[in-house]
Image (tube, rainbow, N blue to C red):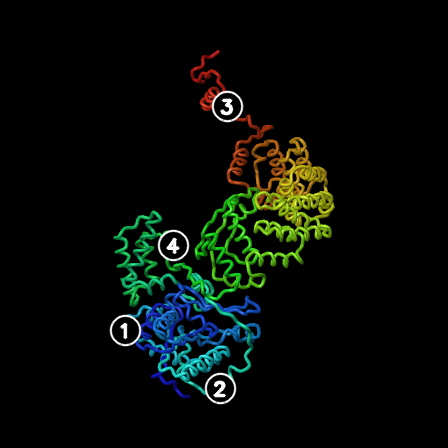
């Protein structure tokens, strides 16, 4: 097989994200000064190389199928990526630069057609083979020692890398190369041939180390053409997008990822003494967290790193040695304290940037303009944002974040306790921009060219076939997103669905969003009368059909229905007025029915008691009946669980009620007690800790006398009460009482 002309072609085999490889590529390109540079990547991005000077890594090339943007691929670049340094060198020295990997038009089109074996077969890790031959059990550590931490002034590592990869490929020759890899290398050779035919004097190829032998041997162009003939193809667009170090980490699922992007960035960017500078920064961060770390700690930690590296035969202390020194010296043995800073520094999270001239779809441009106007800068780290919806700026910010969520762009995560609470003037969000959000925006561009238009179109499409609960949630989302036209359309759809839907549980699920939405009129600038009318009508239908829906319902199915009753009650309270009264009247008639499941019946009684629709005497009679020996213990336990769910305050403030529960429980036989214990543990486990302590205290102070849970069993301590009595007397303008110890006996 003919060899490539090594005077004209220089193949630099690299690890895709490695500071040593990046330094070596930069030095080798400075020495060679090629007039053409080929880089492993999608050829569709050739037109984007002119934007390199405006990019701030980490960034990524994104190629996506224009007919289905969800089918996409990324090629990430960090400052310490060899390919990025090759791009920078070409831009700085005016060399022609081209990407030479198999076009994304083929790889994206072939994703669905690839044979199953092609997708699942794993190639032997060549670094693992070399590391094992060198006596290492960790391929990444071997590569770090041999390449990444090598002396920058030493000889070029690329001839040795080429020789080692040729030996590995020869060793693995019996294992057939995957068809996809063979096609990739065939296309790389085709691009190399075309570059040489164009008359370039010196060509540098930067690619993964595994591919080096395949580019040094040039089979016939006809054989490569046969390999590439007949590949499926689709229409692809490419652009640059910001990336993050977190997405470069192997822990995130990225196949070519590295363990510690922050450490690699540090190794590449610091001019000298990387260990000393790293530990100094760790000490500073610990001091910022009020941890006592001095300069002497740093000195000792550096010495420990050097000693550990020498004992392990490493040329330079690695992240493992630094982690041990941070824990043992800077944090005096506390691993928890060390993790405060070490994990964050090892990741070194940062978000790259792309210039405004980068090709984008219209929706991306509209979103970028809105982010700039609303002063919402995308960032890679979590950022808390509190909005006051009485302010115009915050109201527009809220609408934008909600619209993006409707479009499937997960930039902001709302705190639902504030976004969907009764108080509608305040929202709290956590913002974090992930690279996938850029792809989500591109996917959403099929709905429209602006955020508002795209969201409205998406809502109309979602509402077409949605069930009633989904529609009412969609109304709430549209109100939050300030889409009044979309709200009107969905409200009309809700009216149609409500007339057709006879499922009581559907109606109950649909009510809470409608009730909440009816309160947004003053803040969200939408007339909520239509929503209230629909909600009231749905509530009336629930009141009429609830008893029938509960008839024959088993205890296993009672838990979701009890939750639905709770949610419906909350909706009725929000609607207020006659609607709330009708709902409570329905519960009053439902409460004594024996066909109602225990958990639901207990919950209904609790709602009525809290709403002053059930007096204490009637409640005690009902509980006495349910706790009588003639009732199955499981039904009694379910009734009590429904009644007490979420709060045990009634047991604290109603001694007679506690006495009834206690007598029923202590009167159970051993078998019945074992059967109901899980239910009761779940019930009491849901109480707040102070409530549990208060109930336990009452039980502990009880005796066998009647009324043992009453409030008068403990004598009043007049001496302790005297200061309080005196304070009340002053407030009421009464003469100060005589202290107990000064009173004369009568």
The local secondary structure at tag 2 comes to: helix
Question: Which numbered dot is residue 463?
Answer: none
Viewer-side residue, 745 vs 149: 149
Question: Which residue, given by chain and number where applicable, does mark 2 sit on?
Answer: 223
Q: Does residue 397 sit above or below 216 in this rendering?
A: above
Badge 1 crowding class, 10 Å Cα cut-off, few under 14, some 14 to 19, many 20 or more, is few
Question: Which residue, given by chain and number where applicable, does mark 3 sit on?
Answer: 716
Q: Earlier in the sequence, mark 3 or mark 4?
A: 4
Residue located 41% across and 64% down the image:
58
Please identify, in this view, whether the residue under mark 4 or under mark 2 is nearer the observer.
Answer: 2
Q: Does residue 302 sit above or below 514 in this rendering?
A: below
Distance between mark 1 and mark 3 Cα atoms: 89 Å
Residue 72, x across and y down, in percent: 52, 68
Residue 700, x across and y down, in percent: 53, 34
Residue 248, x across and y down, in percent: 43, 64
Please identify, in this view, whether the residue under mark 1 or under mark 2 is nearer the observer.
Answer: 2
Please identify, in this view, whether the residue under mark 1 or under mark 3 is nearer the observer.
Answer: 1
Q: Earlier in the sequence, mark 4 or mark 2?
A: 2
State whether residue 100 appears in this view.
yes
Question: Which numbered dot is residue 154?
Answer: 1
Q: Earlier in the sequence, mark 1 or mark 3?
A: 1
Question: Which residue, given by chain and number where applicable, does mark 4 sit on?
Answer: 339
Residue 596, x across and y down, in percent: 70, 43
Distance between mark 3 and mark 2 Cα atoms: 102 Å
Would residue 498 appear left or right of 523 to someone viewing this image? right
Q: Earlier in the sequence, mark 1 or mark 2?
A: 1
């Amino acid at each position: 097989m003919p060899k490539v002309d090594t005077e004209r072609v220089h193949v630099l085999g690299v690890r895709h994200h490695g500071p040593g490889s990046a330094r070596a590529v930069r030095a080798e390109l400075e020495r060679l000064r090629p007039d053409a540079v080929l880089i492993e990547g999608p050829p569709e991005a050739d037109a984007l190389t002119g934007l390199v000077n405006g990019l701030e890594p980490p960034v990524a090339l994104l190629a996506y199928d224009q007919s289905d943007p969800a089918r996409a691929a990324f090629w990430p670049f960090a400052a310490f990526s060899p390919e990025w340094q090759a791009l920078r060198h070409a831009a700085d020295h005016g060399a022609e630069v081209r990407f030479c990997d198999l076009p994304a038009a083929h790889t994206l089109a072939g994703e669905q057609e690839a044979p199953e074996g092609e997708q699942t077969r794993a190639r032997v890790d060549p670094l693992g083979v070399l590391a094992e031959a060198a006596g290492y059990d960790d391929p990444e550590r071997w590569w770090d020692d041999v390449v990444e931490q090598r002396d920058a002034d030493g000889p070029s590592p690329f001839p040795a890398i080429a020789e080692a990869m040729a030996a590995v490929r020869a060793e693995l020759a019996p294992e057939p190369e995957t068809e996809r890899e063979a096609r990739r290398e065939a296309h790389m050779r085709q691009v190399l041939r075309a570059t040489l035919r164009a008359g370039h004097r010196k060509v540098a190829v930067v690619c993964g180390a595994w591919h080096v032998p395949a580019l040094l041997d040039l089979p016939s162009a006809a054989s490569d053409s046969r390999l590439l003939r007949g590949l499926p193809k689709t229409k692809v667009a490419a652009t640059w997008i910001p990336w993050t170090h977190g997405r470069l980490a192997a822990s995130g699922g990225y196949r070519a990822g590295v363990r510690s992007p922050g450490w690699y960035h540090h190794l590449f960017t610091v001019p000298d003494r990387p260990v000393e500078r790293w530990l100094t920064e760790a000490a500073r961060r610990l001091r910022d967290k009020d941890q006592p770390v001095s300069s002497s700690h740093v000195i000792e930690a550096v010495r420990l790193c050097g000693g550990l590296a020498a004992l392990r035969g490493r040329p330079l202390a690695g992240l493992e040695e630094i982690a041990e020194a941070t824990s043992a010296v800077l944090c005096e043995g506390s691993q928890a304290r060390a993790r405060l800073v070490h994990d964050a520094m090892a990741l070194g999270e940062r978000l790259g940037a792309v210039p405004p001239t980068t090709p984008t779809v219209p929706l991306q441009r509209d979103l970028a303009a809105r982010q700039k106007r609303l002063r919402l800068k995308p960032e890679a780290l979590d950022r808390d944002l509190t909005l006051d919806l009485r302010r115009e700026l915050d109201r527009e910010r809220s609408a934008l974040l909600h619209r993006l969520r409707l479009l499937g762009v997960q930039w902001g995560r709302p705190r639902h306790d504030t976004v969907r609470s009764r108080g509608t003037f305040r929202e709290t969000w956590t913002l974090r921009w992930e690279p996938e959000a850029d792809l989500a925006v591109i996917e959403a561009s099929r709905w429209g060219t602006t955020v508002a238009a795209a969201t409205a179109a998406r809502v109309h499409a979602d509402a077409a076939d949605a069930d009633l609960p989904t529609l009412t949630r969609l109304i709430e989302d549209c109100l939050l997103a300030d889409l009044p036209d979309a709200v009107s359309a969905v409200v009309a759809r809700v009216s149609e669905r409500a007339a057709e839907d006879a499922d009581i549980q559907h109606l109950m699920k649909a009510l809470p969003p409608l009730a909440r939405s009816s309160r947004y009129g003053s803040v969200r600038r939408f007339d909520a009368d239509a929503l209230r009318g629909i909600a009231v009508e749905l509530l009336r239908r629930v009141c009429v059909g609830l008893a029938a829906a509960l008839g024959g319902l088993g205890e296993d199915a009672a838990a979701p229905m009890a939750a639905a009753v709770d949610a419906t009650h909350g909706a009725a309270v929000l609607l207020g007025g006659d609607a709330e009264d009708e709902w409570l009247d329905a519960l009053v008639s439902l409460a004594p029915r024996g066909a109602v499941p225990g958990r639901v019946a207990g919950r209904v009684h609790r709602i009525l008691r809290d709403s002053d629709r059930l007096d204490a005497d009637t409640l005690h009679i009902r509980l006495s009946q349910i706790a009588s020996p003639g009732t199955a213990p499981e039904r009694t336990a379910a009734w009590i669980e429904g009644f007490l769910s979420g709060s045990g305050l009634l047991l604290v403030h109603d001694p007679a009620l506690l006495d009834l529960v206690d007598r029923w429980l202590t009167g159970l036989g051993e078998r019945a007690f074992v059967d109901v214990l899980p239910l009761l543990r779940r019930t009491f486990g849901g109480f707040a800790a102070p409530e549990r302590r208060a109930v336990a205290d009452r039980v502990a102070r009880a005796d066998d006398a009647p009324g043992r849970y009453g409030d008068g069993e403990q004598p009043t301590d007049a001496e302790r009460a005297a200061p309080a009595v005196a304070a009340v007397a002053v407030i009421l303008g009464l003469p100060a009482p005589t202290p107990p110890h000064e009173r004369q006996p009568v």
